[in-house]
Structure formats: structure tokens, C-alpha cells
Image: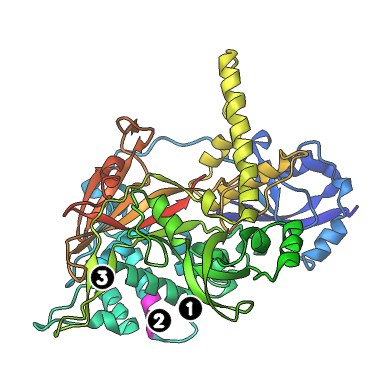
């Protein structure tokens, strides 16, 4: 066992480097860290970031002699071994600061304590304002943008730089700002957004097209590992699952698509080996065709199935998503030697930390009898409900379902144990992890790393779930919580008005339940361009459509902890 080893311990925003005497054991390591950080040893959570050390959270009875320190240092290429420390320092504090009135604060400080700032409408730019406000509360994207360093000057690079600067201005301003540079950069990167009407005024654009364009540019420009690492600092290559840019790491869904020819026996085509042998003996079969694709959003099909012919009545977002993932297509059959009808089924094979769902509100309707135009863009007004939580379990591939089920079964077992303890009158204590993560100053990525390490240390003989996507919480169960909505008001698909509805970071008071439901009635903000007002979850859930009021068009969800 090596006498001393160099260590680099990340604690919050600080990095502490020192040479550790291995013979001192866990107690010696924690004592030295307590002297340097003032974090009590009994409140420390230590995790190894370098390979070849311990798994999960370091336990007090762990024996360092079981580790080949020399090999671990060699794997770090001679550099220090990297550790992660969680815990709050205990120090004597001075007297409380004197009361400071809001009007005495500079603008950038006022912006931190009052409602967020809006964006001025610079001529039918509500499509841009609404999407920008929704994505403003995605910390992973913000960190990625902050680390972005373009290698060349281009319209795409200027667009991302302008977006980053717009967010920085919003953070510093107590009043609405004019996104002039971002609007100019948008029109340069997307010439179609520079279209004007007969009177020279800018035409209204589609918020979804702007969002998709933003995702495309970010995917093309932000491909450096440093940018992905800045966005998702605790994510491994295995969790990324091949995602090579920041868009696919944050929003990308790897889709598994299976095509099955309808003119053959389903059992023979997609059953077990015995069934396939029996089918082969009876006659030729067409094997299923499996492929993989990448999506950056799910679609809630309002009118019917993905083949455009189904007339299923969609009343809930889950029904619409299910329809968009299933359908029928015409495709050549090698066995039949002609075109045949195939059943198409898509399932999610990699989950993202941020999920966007588009409601299929707009569609193109051909007008063959018209002499003025070939068709018109129409809007579907029908109501489609949604909840604060979206469960995507049923939309996942069998491999992903298997891993999610482990976490779901574990959560169900823990809940049953809590209920049984309450029935027996036993005291139910919350896990001290909650206290530790609350002390971590809102660092969601560090919280996720701590939870994952704790889950690994307490797993015991149970098989730990394999990663199902990057940046997901430990023991993720496949549930996403709604945090932002882009809505459209008006019957004209090429007109109307877009607004953003964004969940507040903190609630102003005690959170009540929505009447006759288990939904929490939390605080939200409504961004009507430069005007910002407060609303509640119950107001957001009414954005289902069915009238002339605002209706959901883009729903943004984040992985639920």
C-alpha cells in the first residue's frame, strides 16, 4: 500500500488538493478534510470520481488496504485522485446583516429577488419570446451555453452567442429587455423568419419551428466534450449512450422502430423461437425490420394515428403520444415480391433529462378547387388534457422498461414499509440524504451524483438499475414533471399570439392541493412578452384547448426526482 497519495477533493465550487497519508485510514482522511473545510466528519459524504477506488459513499469502516493505490494513481496518469465531498461547514457567524430595502439595491440584485423579467415584442416576435423564456429555466442548457466557444464566426455561432447574452441580460435586469441582437441573429440563421407582409411588417412565425431550429443549431455547433461535460458534469459515457452534442444529450430520444408485415402470422414473425420454427415449416415468413432513430421531441397526435387515416378520439396527452408512436405504412416485402401493409411501432430506447412534447395543433389542408392557393394551414381546436406528471413507462422499449421497473418496484416496496410502520405506530424518519442535498445550495447535478452514490452503497445484493439516459436522477422511474408550456391563442395558424407559462423556482407560501385532485397547486409565471404575472398550476392545466383561449402547443418536462 502506497504511503501517501495526492488527492483533489471537489467541495461545492472549491477544489482542495493535498497529500494524504493512507495509513491514517478513513478517520484520518475525514479529520484532515474537517480541518480544511470545517465540515464535521459525521456529516461528510465522500464519493470517488477516479477509477479503482471505492463504490458509492465512503463508509467509516472501509479498509484502504483493500485498494491498490499505486494502480489507482497510474490510472489517473500520475495526477491526483479525484474525490467529491458533500456537506456544509459549521462556523461561527457574525451578526446578521442589516435590513436592505429593495429600492436601494442595484438592478442586477433586484432581478434576483423579484419576478423574472420579460422580453419586448419587436414585431410579431412572440414565437421567439415564448420559447426563450421556457428554456431559460433549463440549467443544463444554460451551463452548456456559458461554456460555448465558437471556432469560427458564422450565423449559427452568432445565434447561440446572442441567445446566451439575452439570458445574461434577463438575469441582470429588473425590467423587460429588448432582444434586438437575438432577433437579428435569428433572421440571419433562419432566413424564413425574416419574411414580411404586404405592408412590410414581420410575419408571425411558428414557435415549434423556432425551437426545432434552435435545437438543430445547438446540435451542430456544440459538439465539444467540454460543453457536454459542463451541461452534465456527472454523466458517464455509458449514460450518454452515443449522444455526441449538447442537444441530443439534453433533449434527444433514441427510438427503437419495429416494422412487422401484416400479411404474415404475428406469432411467426415476432414470437419466440419455437413459434418461428413452426411458422417456417408451414411456409415463408417476413422477419420484422428493426431500426433506430433519434428524435428531439415527442408528438401528441390530436387527429388520429401516425398514418393520418385513424379517427381515434384523443382526449389526453398520453393517448396522442401513443398514437404517434404506432401506425401503418406501405412498404416492399421481399418475401411477397410486392408492396404490403406493415405495422409500425416506435419505442424509446434512451431517455433524456428534458422532454419536449408538441401538440399537433397545426396541419396543412389541400384546397384543389381554389385558384388562389394550393392549400391552407389549419388549427385543431379540440381539447386535450394533460397533468403535472407525465409517465413515459409504456412508451419505452422492453430493455428500458426492465431497468425502470427495478426502481419502481423498489419505490413501491419502500412505500409499503412506510405505511406498515405508520399502522404499527412506529416512528418514520426521513432519509438524512434529503438534509444533505438541501445543504448543497441547489446544485442539482451534485445532488443527483450523491443520490446515485448512496443508491449504489445501499444496493446490497439487489441488482442496480443500468443507465437509461444521461443526467437522470438516481432510481429514475420514468416520470417527468411539467415545468414550462408554450401556448397559442387564435384560430389563425399563421397569426394569433404565443405566450410562455413557466413554473416558479420557489413557492410564495404553503402549497395546497387543487380541488378534487392530488395535484399540487404551485406558483407559475405567465410571460406575455414584456408583461409578467403570477398564476397557479390549476391555471396551467386549463390550457387544454377547446375554445378561443390560449391552448398548449409545446410542453416541457424534466425528469422527476
Nearer-the-camera pick, 235 or 551: 551
Q: Which residue is mark 1?
A: 221
Q: Are marks 2 and 3 in contact (CB under 8 Å)?
A: no
Task: Give the SS element for disc 3.
Answer: loop
Give the alpha-carbon distance from disc 3 to disc 1, as whole Å. 21 Å
Give the alpha-carbon distance from disc 2 to disc 3, as whole Å. 17 Å
Compared to 488, does 41 lie above or below? above
Sequence-wise, which precedes: disc 3 or disc 1? 3
Q: Which residue is mark 3?
A: 179
User: Among all residues in the image, which is located at the extreme right?
Assistant: 1
Q: Which residue is mark 2?
A: 156
Query: At 37% from the left edge and 84% from the top edge, which residue is drawn?
Result: 155
Task: Give the SS element for disc 2.
Answer: helix
Q: Is residue 538 visible?
A: yes
In the rendered view, does 407 fall on the left or right side of 120? right
Q: Is residue 86 visible?
A: no
Compared to 59, does 247 lie above or below? below
Nearer-the-camera pick, 449 or 192: 192
Q: Which residues are magenta?
A: 155-160
Give coordinates of residue 332: x percent, y percent. Answer: 55, 79
Nearer-the-camera pick, 64 or 261: 261
Amino acid at each position: 500500500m502506497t504511503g501517501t497519495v495526492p488527492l483533489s477533493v471537489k467541495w461545492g465550487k472549491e477544489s482542495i488538493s493535498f497529500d494524504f497519508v493512507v495509513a491514517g485510514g478513513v478517520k484520518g482522511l475525514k479529520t484532515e478534510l474537517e480541518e480544511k473545510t470545517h465540515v464535521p466528519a459525521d456529516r461528510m459524504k465522500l464519493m470517488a470520481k477516479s477509477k479503482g477506488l471505492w463504490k458509492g459513499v465512503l463508509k467509516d469502516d472501509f479498509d484502504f488496504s483493500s485498494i491498490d493505490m499505486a494502480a489507482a494513481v497510474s490510472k489517473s496518469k500520475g495526477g491526483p485522485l479525484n474525490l467529491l465531498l458533500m456537506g456544509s461547514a459549521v462556523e461561527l457567524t457574525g451578526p446578521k446583516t442589516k435590513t436592505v430595502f429593495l429600492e436601494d439595491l442595484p438592478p442586477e440584485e433586484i432581478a434576483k429577488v423579484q419576478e423574472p423579467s420579460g422580453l419586448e415584442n419587436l414585431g410579431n416576435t412572440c414565437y421567439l419570446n415564448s420559447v426563450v423564456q421556457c428554456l431559460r429555466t433549463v440549467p443544463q442548457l444554460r451551463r452548456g451555453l456559458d461554456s460555448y466557444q465558437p471556432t469560427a464566426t458564422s450565423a449559427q455561432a452568432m445565434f447561440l452567442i446572442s441567445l446566451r447574452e439575452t439570458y445574461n441580460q434577463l438575469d441582470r435586469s429588473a425590467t423587460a429587455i429588448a432582444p434586438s441582437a437575438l432577433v437579428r441573429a435569428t433572421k440571419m440563421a433562419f432566413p424564413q423568419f425574416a419574411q414580411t407582409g404586404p405592408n412590410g411588417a414581420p410575419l408571425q412565425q411558428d414557435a415549434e419551428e423556432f425551437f426545432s431550429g434552435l435545437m438543430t443549431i445547438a446540435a451542430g455547433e456544440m459538439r465539444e466534450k467540454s460543453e457536454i461535460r459542463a451541461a452534465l458534469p456527472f454523466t458517464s459515457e455509458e449514460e450518454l449512450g452515443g449522444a455526441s452534442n449538447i442537444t441530443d444529450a439534453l433533449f434527444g430520444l433514441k427510438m427503437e422502430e419495429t416494422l412487422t408485415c401484416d400479411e404474415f402470422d404475428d406469432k411467426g414473425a415476432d414470437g419466440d423461437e419455437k413459434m418461428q420454427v413452426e411458422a417456417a415449416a408451414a411456409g415463408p415468413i417476413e422477419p420484422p425490420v428493426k431500426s433506430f432513430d433519434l428524435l428531439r421531441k415527442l408528438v401528441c397526435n390530436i387527429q388520429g394515428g401516425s398514418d393520418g387515416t385513424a379517427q381515434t378520439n384523443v382526449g389526453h396527452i398520453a393517448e396522442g403520444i401513443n398514437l404517434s408512436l404506432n401506425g401503418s405504412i406501405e412498404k416492399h416485402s421481399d418475401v411477397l415480391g410486392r408492396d404490403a401493409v406493415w405495422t409500425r411501432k416506435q419505442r424509446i430506447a434512451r431517455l433524456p433529462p428534458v422532454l419536449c412534447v408538441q401538440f399537433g395543433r397545426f396541419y396543412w389542408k389541400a384546397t384543389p378547387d381554389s385558384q388562389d392557393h394550393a392549400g391552407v394551414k389549419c388549427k385543431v381546436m379540440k381539447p386535450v388534457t394533460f397533468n403535472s406528471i407525465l409517465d413515459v413507462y409504456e412508451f419505452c422499449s422492453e430493455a428500458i422498461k426492465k431497468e425502470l421497473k427495478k426502481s419502481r418496484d423498489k419505490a413501491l416496496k419502500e412505500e409499503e414499509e412506510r405505511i406498515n410502520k405508520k399502522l404499527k405506530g412506529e416512528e418514520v424518519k426521513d432519509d438524512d440524504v434529503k438534509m444533505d442535498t438541501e445543504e448543497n445550495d441547489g446544485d442539482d447535478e451534485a445532488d443527483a451524483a450523491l443520490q446515485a452514490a448512496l443508491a449504489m452503497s445501499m444496493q446490497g445484493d439487489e441488482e442496480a438499475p443500468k443507465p437509461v439516459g444521461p443526467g437522470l436522477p438516481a432510481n429514475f422511474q420514468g416520470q417527468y414533471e411539467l415545468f414550462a408550456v408554450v401556448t397559442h391563442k387564435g384560430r389563425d395558424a399563421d397569426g394569433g399570439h404565443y405566450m410562455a407559462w413557466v413554473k416558479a423556482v420557489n413557492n410564495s407560501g404553503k402549497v395546497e392541493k387543487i380541488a378534487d385532485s392530488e395535484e399540487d397547486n404551485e406558483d407559475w409565471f405567465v410571460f406575455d412578452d414584456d408583461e409578467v404575472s403570477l398564476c397557479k398550476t390549476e391555471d396551467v392545466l386549463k390550457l387544454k384547448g377547446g375554445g378561443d383561449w390560449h391552448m398548449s402547443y409545446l410542453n416541457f418536462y424534466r425528469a422527476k426526482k
